[in-house]
Amino acid sequence: MLIIFDLDDTLIDTSGCFTPIKLRCVLKSMIFNGLIVKSEEEALKYLVELNKISINADEAIRTFLERFDAVEYLDIGIKEYYKDYNSDFDIDVLDNALEVLQQLKEKKHLLALVSYGNEELQMRKIKKSGLNLDIFNKVFITDKHNKEFFYESLARFFNFNFDGVVVCGDKFKTDILPAKKLGMKTIKMQWGRSLANPAKEDGADYSIKNLKEILNIVDVLNKK
């Protein structure tokens, strides 16, 4: 079986370790450019909480600025959020990620990674987390939100029918939906924003809160 993983908030804890750092940079940049807040720490806390319940960071920053009647700083905030981050940071793998990948590999499944983002930054996250790229048979880091092309390319490269491919990610629109369109099996990781926006709108085949749950799911699918 071919199993394709997302990276952020699927294998590594981006929302818990890295996103707050980026949001602090966003807030500082907007303040530097003229945004007025009574308390930087209280403003940051509010922005972080908004981000947890927003579809993406863009929406969180917009909602935050609307609260302060300061949407003129939106472009500054968004540009800062997506700018490469060059300072040092720590980032953790999610619970059981390393063990689950190793067990899937030992069971002769093929593993792939398809991640959206800046390639240099994503590679730094991977290195910082201790995730071993050698465990994957193929890795794609893309600046395209829609991953359908990469899913299809991986299936054809490894000579798998689409129904023999499993995709695991935390975002329905960018991770799960493209896989469902191709007829692949899908696993929604409930982490990060997914914890605040749980499954009622999702059409994933399976929903999990711990990566260890993947092992049983794959075993069941492999027997069909």
Image: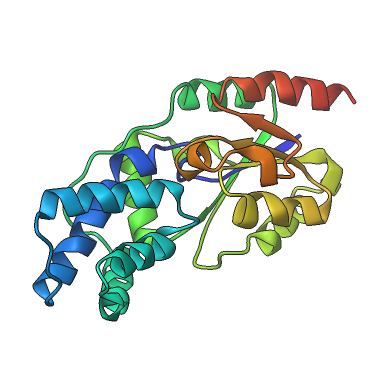
Q: Quadrant of the C terminus?
A: top right
Q: Which one is in front, 132 or 220?
A: 220
Residue drawn where x is 30% and y is 64% of the image: 67
Evaluate whether residue 106 shows in this view. no
Q: How many marks?
A: 0
Rendering quarter of residue 17: top left
Q: Position of residue 121 (x, y in %)?
A: 33, 57
Residue drawn where x is 26% and y is 50% of the image: 46
Rendering quarter of residue 80: bottom left
Question: Is 137 displayed left or right of 186 in the figure?
Answer: left
Query: In this picture, is 198 found above or below 212?
Result: below
Question: Is 90 displayed left or right of 109 in the figure?
Answer: left
Q: Position of residue 164 (x, y in %)?
A: 82, 39
Q: Position of residue 204 (x, y in %)?
A: 72, 41
Q: Which one is in front, 35 or 20?
A: 35
Question: Is 141 displayed left or right of 76 in the figure?
Answer: right
Query: In this picture, is 39 found above or below 207?
Result: below
Evaluate whether residue 164 shows in this view. yes
Q: Position of residue 96 (x, y in %)?
A: 48, 21
Q: How is the image coloured?
A: rainbow
Residue drawn where x is 33% and y is 33% of the image: 92
Q: Quadrant of the N terminus?
A: top right
Rendering quarter of residue 78: bottom left
